[in-house]
Amino acid sequence: MEGIKFFLFGGKGGVGKTTCAAAQAIKFAQNGKKSLLFSTDPAHSLADSFGIRLSQGINSLGQIPNLFLYEIKAEDVYDIFREEYFAEIKKLLATCSYLDEEDLDDLLSLSIPGLDELMGLKTIMDFIESHEFDVYIWDTAPTGHTLRLLTLPEILDEWVIAAARMKWKYYDVIRGLLPQDSFEPGEDIFFKMKKLIKNVYSFLKNPGSSHFTLVMIPAAMAIEESKRMGKQLSSNGISVQRIIINNMNPNNVDCPFCKEKNEAQSQYLKEITDYYRGKEIIVISAQPQEVKGPGMLSCITEYF
Ligand SMILES: Nc1ncnc2c1ncn2[C@@H]1O[C@H](COP(=O)(O)OP(=O)(O)O)[C@@H](O)[C@H]1O
Ligand SMILES: [Mg+2]
């Protein structure tokens, strides 16, 4: 994992993504790496996991130096998009049609699926470019959301190409209608967007810079969903490097209920290890108490 900067934790809801991402981030921080743990799950839970309150933006964590937490809110990143791109797109669309301001706002917010997540990643890419942190640990949203983001390039590409085509189609007309110099194409906004998309995805697809951990629990539904996610990721050029099987019950119990549960879990464990043969696999035991706060998270850190 030497040289890798970006660690993604993905999987079905409730399997332990946030817990594992937090434990991994603590581990890096303890090893002296300046670490940014960030989440894009709209139901943010970094604050709950650490048992603290987080303010907007990047938070430092007194008791663990080197560790910084950031819950990226969709509204904030949407503002970044508005600032950087919106005005120009709006100017373009407004000159081409009879839509009013409100219609345009609705249209733009509706027609760009996954834009909030992309802009969230853009803020992280900006940190990476300025070498702010040594490592980045991403607590992703549950499967559907994350896949939408990771399969976004094609959707966005289509949108950008269609919009760019429209711009050039109407360019002469608009220029002719407006007073001289009031329609300034400036740096092509669509070119800028395409460049951003390309940068983000080439970073995510490069196993030398990004590392994907798929988290699951030993239960049929979680395993099936993880397999589907793994396939979709790999068909988009992103490979899963590590598997975490979380919440394994201890084996040395003699109540009939636990015994039956353990037998089922052991079968699933075998199925997972066979299916993901060759990949790094970490098996984490179910803890007697809920994993919450830096103290409890440190128990999970030992697995990394
Ligand atoms: N190994 C474990 N043992 C006991 N509780 C766990 C373990 N891993 C996670 N939990 C608990 O399970 C719940 C869900 O975990 P979380 O990390 O929030 O999942 P996700 O981010 O995938 O939705 C949390 O209450 C967490 O404290
Ligand atoms: Mg979570």
Image: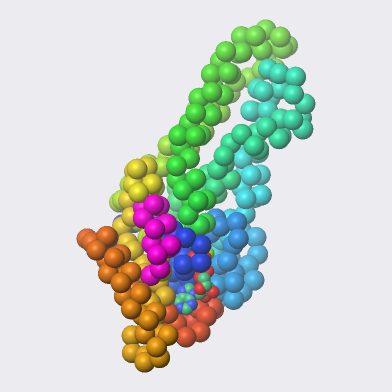
In magenta stretch: residue 243 = no
Q: Is residue 2 above or below residue 209?
A: below
Q: Residue furthest bottom?
A: 254
Residue 39, position in %: x, y?
Answer: 53, 59
Q: How many marks?
A: 0
For the rendered model, the colour scheme is rainbow
Q: Residue at x 33, y 78 (%)?
A: 263
Residue 44, position in %: x, y?
Answer: 59, 62
Q: Is residue 103 above or below residue 81?
A: above
In magenta stretch: residue 219 = yes
Residue 141, position in %: x, y?
Answer: 52, 56
Q: Is residue 123 visible?
A: no
Query: Quick one: 302 or 83, which is closer to the camera?
Result: 302
Q: Residue at x 60, y 60 (%)?
A: 43
Left or right: 287 with respect to 227?
right
User: Within the image, what quadrant is residue 108 found in?
Assistant: top right
Q: Residue at x 61, y 13 (%)?
A: 170
Query: Quick one: 67 or 38, which is closer to the camera?
Result: 38
First to last magenta residue range? 218-230
Query: Quick one: 12 or 264, which is closer to the camera?
Result: 264
User: Within the image, what quadrant is residue 7 found in?
Assistant: bottom left
User: Within the image, what quadrant is residue 25 found in?
Assistant: bottom left
Residue 115, position in %: x, y?
Answer: 57, 41
In the picture, the quarter occupied by the N terminus is: bottom left
Predominant secondary structure, magenta span = helix
Q: Is residue 53 above or below residue 4?
A: below
Q: Is residue 170 above or below residue 24?
A: above
Q: Is residue 96 visible?
A: yes
Q: Residue at x 57, y 39 (%)?
A: 113
In the picture, the quarter occupied by the C terminus is: bottom left
